[in-house]
Amino acid sequence: MKITLKELERFKKVTINDFSDYEQDKSHDGGRYGFWTNFNRVDKNWVVTYGTTADFDFCPYCGNWGDSCGCDEPQIISSLDLLIELSEFRETEDEYIEFIL
Ligand SMILES: [Zn+2]
C-alpha cells in the first residue's frame, strides 16, 4: 500500500479490515470472526480503536478479548506511524484497507 503523508492526512478515517478467518454463519460465536482497526484522525494524529464481529467482550482500545486488560483510553499514533503501518500491510481479498474522506 503506497500513500504519501500528505495524501494520508486528507482522510478522516482509515480502517484496516481482517476478514481472512471470517465465516458469516460463525461470525458471532462460532470462532470465525472478522476484525478491524479504525484510525480516526485528530489533526496530525490518529485515535486507534478495534472492532470485531464476535459477540464476546472485546476491548476496543487494544483488541484483546475480555476486559481484564484494564485499558481506559485509546492509543494515539502519529500520521508517520500510521503511514509505516499501511506501507507494511499486504492487501488481499480478505485483508484490506478502507479510506474515508
Ligand atoms: Zn484493552
Image (cartoon, rainbow, N blue to C red):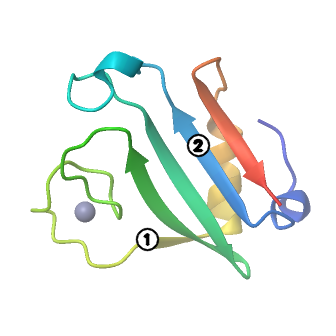
Tell me where residue 95 appears, x and y as whole percent: 58, 27
On residue 16, the disc is 2
Residue 98 shown left or right of residue 51 in the figure: right
Question: What residue type is disc 2 on?
Answer: Ile
Quarter placement of the N terminus: top right
Question: What residue type is disc 1 on?
Answer: Gln
Task: From the viewer's side, name the closer residue of 39 and 28.
Answer: 28
On residue 50, the disc is none
Q: What residue sits 34% from the left and 29% below the top?
A: 33
Q: What residue sits 73% from the left and 78% below the top?
A: 44
Quarter placement of the C terminus: bottom right
On residue 75, the disc is 1
User: Among all residues in the image, which is located at the extreme left?
Assistant: 68
Residue 9 shown left or right of residue 91 in the figure: right
Tell me where residue 80 appears, x and y as whole percent: 70, 63
Tell me the element at label 2: strand
Graded by Cα atoms within 10 Å as few (under 14), some (14 to 19) or many (20 or more), the crowding at tag 1 reads: few
Task: From the viewer's side, name the closer residue of 70 and 32.
Answer: 32
User: Among all residues in the image, which is located at the extreme bottom?
Assistant: 43
State whether residue 66 is above or below residue 94: below
Residue 66 shown left or right of residue 100 in the figure: left
Q: What residue sits 24% from the left and 72% below the top?
A: 71
Res. 12 image quadrant = bottom right
State whether residue 34 is above or below residue 56: above
Tell me where residue 16 appears, x and y as whole percent: 59, 43
Tell me the element at label 1: strand
